[in-house]
Image (spheres, helix red, strand yellow):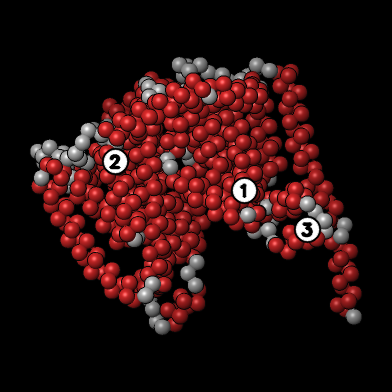
Amino acid sequence: MTVAIEKPEKTKAVEPAAPAKGARKVSRPMMIGAILVVWLVLFVILRGKQTLSLAAADLTDLHRSINDFNDSIGANRNSNPLFLYFFNEIRLVIDNLVTFIQHLISQPSGGRPVPQVGWLGVVGIAGYVSWAVGNWRVALLAVAGFTFFGLQGLWQESMDTLALTLSAVFVALLFAIPLGVWAGLSDRFNRIMTPFLDFMQTMPTFVYLAPLTLFFLIGGASATIATVIYAAPPTIRITAHAIRNVSKTTVEAADSLGATRRQSLLKVLLPMSKRTVVMGVNQTIMAALAMVTIAALINAPGLGANVIQALQSLDVGTAFNAGLAIVVMAIVLDRVTTAASAREENARRSKNTFVKWRRPLLGAGAVVTAVLIYLSHTYLWAADFPGDGTIGSHIASAADTATNWAQDNLSGLTNTIRDIITNGLLNPFQTLLTDSPWWLVGAVLVALGVVFGGWKAGVTTGVCVGLLVGTGVWSDGMTTLTSTLVATVLVMVLGIVFGVWMGRSMLVDRLIRPTLDAAQVMPPFVYLVPFLALFGATRFTAIVAAIVYGAPVTMKIIADGIRAVPEATVEAATSAGCNTWQIITKVQLPMSRSALTLATNQGLIYVLSMVVVGGLVGAGALGYDVVAGFSQGQLYGKGLAAGLAIVLLGVMFDRITQAAARRASA
C-alpha cells in the first residue's frame, strides 16, 4: 500500500514542472530574436560611433610596446642569461636535429654535393618501412609517391618538408606519449591537462608562429618548435583515452598476479593500447605536416615556401604543383600510419603461414634497402634525382591552362556566386558588426553566449570581448568574425544536407566518407589554390576554401548523429504516417541536437583557421595583419596582437558551442 501511494505523489510532483521546462525551450529562440531586434534598433541609432576602427598602417600603444619588446629581445639575445642558457640552447638542439636530418636526406653535407642518403636510398627506405608496418600495397603507394616528388622537380623541397615533419614528430612524441600515459593513469593530471589541450587545439596554425619568433628567431628551429606544440595534443589525448579504456578486468587480473605498477603499465596497459596510440601518432603526423607547410611564413624550407611564394604572386600553376606534392605526402604518411595501426589486428586474424613467409621476405627487403642506401651514398646517379622536373612543368602548365579557361568561361557563374554571397550575406553582416559601437557588439555577444551556453559561457565571452578590445584590432576582428560566421552557416547547411543523406543511407556513406577522410588529410592552405584560380585574390576565395575545409568534419559528425537515432523511434514515426521529410525534421534532427551542436563547434574552429590563412590571398582582416607582421618589421606588434585576437575568437567560439553541446546532450 505504501508503494502504491508514493507513486501517484511522485507523478503529481513531476507533472507541473514539465510545462515550465517546455516554456524555457520555447523562450530561447524568443530571447535570441529579442537580442537581435534590440541590436538592429540601436545600430540604426548609433551607426558609425565608437567603432574602434584602425587603418592598416596605424599602430596602438600596445603594438608599439610589443615592437619595443621585440627590439629589446633582439638587442639582448646574446647577453641575457635566460636566452644564453635556455632559449638559445633549445634552439641549438632543435636546429642540430633538423640540420642532421636535412643533411641525411635533403641537403648537401660534409663537402658532398648531395645528401648522405640520395633519392634511391630514400625511396628504398620509404618502401621498406611501409611494407614492414603495413602491407605491399602501402609500400607500392609510398614508392610511387616519393618517386613522384622527383618527377615534379621538387625532390629537395619535399625532403626538406619531410625532414621538418620527422623532426617535429620525434620531439613531440618524446613528450606526448609519456604525458598521455600520465593523463590516462591520473584523473587529477588529466583534469589539469584538458584545458591546456583544449586551448592548444583551438588555436589556428598561424597563431603559434609569431610568439615563437620572439624567442627562437625565424627559421627551421622555430618552425619545428611551433609544430611540436601544435602536433602534440592529439597523441596526448588519444594515448590517455587508450589507457583509460583498457579492460578493468585485465588490469585487476594482472594486479592479482602480483604485477607491480611498472609491470602493469609495460606488460598490460601499453601493449593493449598500442593500436589506438598509433592512431594518435597518425594524427600528430598529419598536424605536423600541416604546420610545417604554414611555417614557411617564418622562413622554414620546403614545399610550403613554394606554395606561399606562388600564392603571393598569384602563380596558380606553381602553387598547384607544390600543393599537389603536399597532398601526395599527406596521403602517403596517412596511409602508412593507418596501416601500422591496423597491422597488429590483421596479423592476429591471419594464419601462421603468413607470419612464416613474411619474416624472410622482410629480411630480404632489408638487404635490398641497405644496398640501395649504399648506392645512393656512393654514386651520383643514385643520389641526385635524374631529370629536370618535366612532369612538374607540365602539371603547372596544365593548371595555368585550366585557370585561364575557368576565368574565361566560368567567370560569369563564379562572379555571380561571389556577388550573391558577398552582397547578400557578407557585406550587410560585416556592416552590422564593424559599424556598430564596440560595446553594443560586445553586449550582444555576451548575451548570446549566456543564451546558448549558460552564464559560464557568458563570462568567458565577456572576458574575450574585453581582451579583444585591448588588442587594438577590434575592427579587423569583426571582419574576421563576419567571414567565419557566414562560412560556418554555409558549412552547416552542407553538413546537414549531406550528413542526413549519409546517416540515412549506408551506401551513400560508403561512397562519400572516403572522400571526406581524404579531404581532412590535406593541409589547410592547399585548399586556397583551386579557389584562387576560380575567384581570384579576394576574401571570398578564403571563405569558399574555409567551407570546403570545414564541411567534411561536420558531415561526418551529423551522419553519425543521425545514425545513432534508435531505429525503433524511426519505425514508430513511420507507422504513425510520417513521411520522409517529417521523420527528418521532427524526429532525427531534433534527436541529434548534441551532434549538430558538436558539428557547429568543429565547423567553427576549422573555418576560423582557414579564414585567417586566407590572408595570403587577399582576405584581409586578422589574417593579413599576421602575415604583414612577419614581412614588415614595424607591423610585428600589430601582427602579434592580431594572433592574440584570433585566439580570443577561437576560445569564445569553442566555449559557447561546447557549453551548448553539453546542454543539448543533457
Choose between 503 and 641: the one closer to the eye: 503
The residue at the point 86 percent across, 66 percent down is 11
- Which numbered marker is on residue 593? none
154 over 369 or under it: above or below: above
Amino acid identity at mark 3: Thr
For label 3, the residue is: 574
518 over 237 or under it: above or below: above
For label 2, the residue is: 149
- Snapshot quadrant of residue 82: top left
| Pointers 2 and 3 in contact (C-beta within 8 Å) | no
Image quadrant holding the N terminus, namely bottom right
Amino acid identity at mark 2: Phe
Image coords of residue 23 (percent x, y): 83, 47
The residue at the point 9 percent across, 38 percent down is 111
- Snapshot quadrant of residue 281: bottom left
For label 1, the residue is: 499
